[in-house]
Amino acid sequence: MTDASGYRLPRTVVPRRYDLVVEPDLDAGTFRGSEDVLVEVRERVDAIVLNAAVLEVSGGWLEGPDGRLGISEVRLDPETERAHLRLPDPVEPGEWTLHLDFAGQLSDRMLGFYRSTYRDERGVTRTVATTQFQSTDARRAFPCWDEPDLKAVFGITIVAPDQRLAISNGAEVDRVPVGDGRVRIRFSDTMPMSTYLVAFVVGPMEATDPVDVDGVPLRVVHVPGRGHLTAFALEVGAFCLRFFSGYYGIPYPDRKMDLVALPDFPQGAMENVGCVTFRDNLLLVDPETATQPELAAVADVIAHELAHMWFGDLVTMRWWNGTWLNEAFATFMEVLAVDAYRPGWERWTQFLRTRSVAFEVDALRSTRSIEYPVRSPDEAAGMFDVLTYTKGAAVLRMLEQYLGPDRFREGIRRYLVAHRFGNTETHDLWDALEAVSGEPVRRIMDGWIWQGGYPIVIAELGNGTARLTQERFLLSGGSEPGAWDVPLLIRRGNGAEPLLVEPRGATVAVEAGQPLIVNAGAHAFARVRYDDALLARITRALDRLSVDERTQLVDDRWAATLAGQASAVGFCRFAEPFVDETELSVWQAILQGLSWCERLLEAGSREGFRAWVRGLLRPAIDRIGWGPRAGEPDLVRALRGTLVGALGVLGGDPEVEALARRIVEDDRAGRPADPSLVAAAVAVVATSGTPEDHERYLEARESAPTPQQQLRYLYALADFRDPVLLDRTISLVLSDGVRPQNAPHLLARAIANRDHGERAWRFVKEHWAEIERRVAPSTFVYAVDGLRYLTGPGQVEDAAAFLAEHPIPQSSLQVQQILERQRVNAAFRQRSAPELAAAFSAPT
């Protein structure tokens, strides 16, 4: 075991500027390069230590005021990913230039400098060389000081075939032929930045004409033939650059912005300064065929990455333990920006559904604090999870609402101005917010950042008052220590008022017969449990609750059900008064619980449950109409698709299945159809799909005209209930039939297949090593995420035993969380299946 110091570089020699030359050979899958690094030697040394991994580092020298020293020895340490450069004589403090030559292989696992491929219109495979360096993979492309606080200016030059597009962080400033059809392309210097933000892309790609955004040229880069899918991204990108410049009070800190859609990319996108790289379905989209959630996903990711240009790139965490603040703040800002871009999408309301996933993970005993010590690259990679992004964003939203948006923004501006081009610790932000607000921000937030879990606020009615107490909420039951300062809003009449519920609790006055809304607006990262008297007051006045409050009320009730504090049948009865509900997020929360209930039922009881579901959902669809209406809001269309899909899958409605088949036929024939209904129909048909349907879906996953449509059909292949067809689907992940970036998600969905998930899990176990070699290390854990749905006899023990023998080092904590969620769900099955069967076997 290597301790933390074994991974942290010494500060005796630090970089100030890199002049980097890289020449990829796309046909051979290799690259070579050289670098001249201006370094500051801080004390007398006879060796230089920097990072390098899977590289050949050859000739080099150190040049200073007194001449040039050759490097006498280069020693590479694979465990710590370091290069040790021995000098023939000690060198004195001052400025020196380090020259190194290096070479390497383009990776096939979407990390470092890697190879991405696509087929052109003639069916010929074309290769793009591109980068993904976060967290610690710049060292796989060039020797460097690969730690976030060792910022430097980068002057990047690419040598490439003249007919290939080459882009990097800076704008192209010079192009010189070097013979053999190659050109030497030099890019403008970057601002001082961390190595993980360096990017370069070379290959047969195209760029749109630039859009001028207040002096910043904005382009979308894409594979040929996809230019017609770029307009939405350009519109969103331009809006966000202006929005963030205004919000932060600082102009965009660099000179240009390219948004790059790559055929293969491990995560959603990456915030490289001036050269943001994306998975293609999160950048290229046709608004005429995309659903509202698909469009929102594109807008969200663009906004997230552009928010990073200030928060993360201009000001960067000092070390990887601060990753959460970079990602959480960008997530917070993405919702804020997209809410301003399309107010009708109600992005903060939809964020509650995303937050529900973080609630579920953070209610496990295996959760973690938002911030924790990080030593190794594997531990740094483990930071990129739902707790970092979603819980982090949720507690920032909670703080913003408690302080007020204006004071919160003033504190953010103060923080960015004070630390621009520098590095920070988490407390630097709290101190800035505390300085402008006068509130005890550090005290409040330390309780949320440095301990895992969250509270459930228990509201109990007394004599004209309500007593609010708190305890840690755990899905597995029981209690554990935990104390929070919970900044929330309460509503006793028409207006909401702030209340800080401290660990000792609080008491508030309540008028006779009037509802008390704890966590008004649903901003606090906490659940609420009302006693029967208070809950009865609320359910009699659902129309007085906001959409967010109704959504959270349902989500809290389902969490209580999963934790064994309420019954599954009770949840179904609780859902019945919502028959007149008209809001998407509330229905999504209801359907989450009903989907789990449906999984537990068999034969006759399932038919009884389906009939009950039809009675619940059909009136809601009748009310909004079965087809789109001119001028209706986007969220109404999304709600229609959600309800129709649920009526077909959970309700087993034969009329809906027939409708779905007609819609899918129209979609595949290119006839106009509402995207929300198409997405629902694709899912409905899959659950009763025939071999002929399966063949059509296989064809559509490649021939559909947009990335979103292709993925609809691809992932729906995992929902087919015929075991032979499911076997055909999962076997695709070992072939070119499924891109490695999509393979883990397809496998997870197959493992979640209600009838045959065990078959998919058996396949994963049998082909573990092959799958691991195909996918990016950072995404491998997603392949086992579906295990939480395998809750039958012996399945919990089998999963735990296998994963104990087959660890995923960079995601070890996430694996433990998946296994605990599986245990929680198995306990729910054991507890709830008999009562659900009894309730729905009888007439409902």
Image: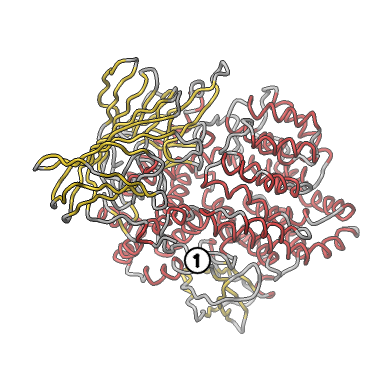
Image point (54%, 79%), residue name: 509
Give the amino acid type for the residue marked by disc 1 in the picture: Ala
Image x and y of residue 762, in percent? 72, 48
Q: Toward the viewer: 535 or 652? A: 652
Q: Residue furthest bottom?
A: 463
Residue 817 on image: x %, y %: 59, 60
Residue placed at 16% from the left, 55% from the top?
A: 44
Residue under the image location 75 percent in, 32 percent down: 694
**Res. 247 visible in picture:** no
As drawn, is 231 to the left or to the right of 551? left
Q: Is residue 32 above or below residue 544?
A: above
Q: Position of residue 612 (x, y in %)?
A: 82, 53
Q: Which residue is mark 1?
A: 496
Secondary structure under badge 1? Answer: strand
Where is residue 227? Give x, y as percent.
48, 23
Q: Going by the image, does 679 lie left or right of 423? A: right
| Mark 1, other Cα within 10 Å: few <14 / some 14–19 / many ≥20 | some
Q: Is residue 413 visible?
A: yes
- Which residue does the image show at 67% across and 22% down from the upper left? 670
Specify the quadrant that holds the N terminus: bottom left
Quadrant in the picture for the C terminus: bottom right
Name above or below for residue 613 compared with residue 457: above
For residue 772, side relative to residue 560 (left or right): left
Location of residue 273 by image quarter: top left
Q: Left or right: 558 with respect to 378? A: right
Q: Please, which colouring scheme is shown?
A: secondary structure
Q: Nearer the viewer, residue 263 or 428?
A: 263
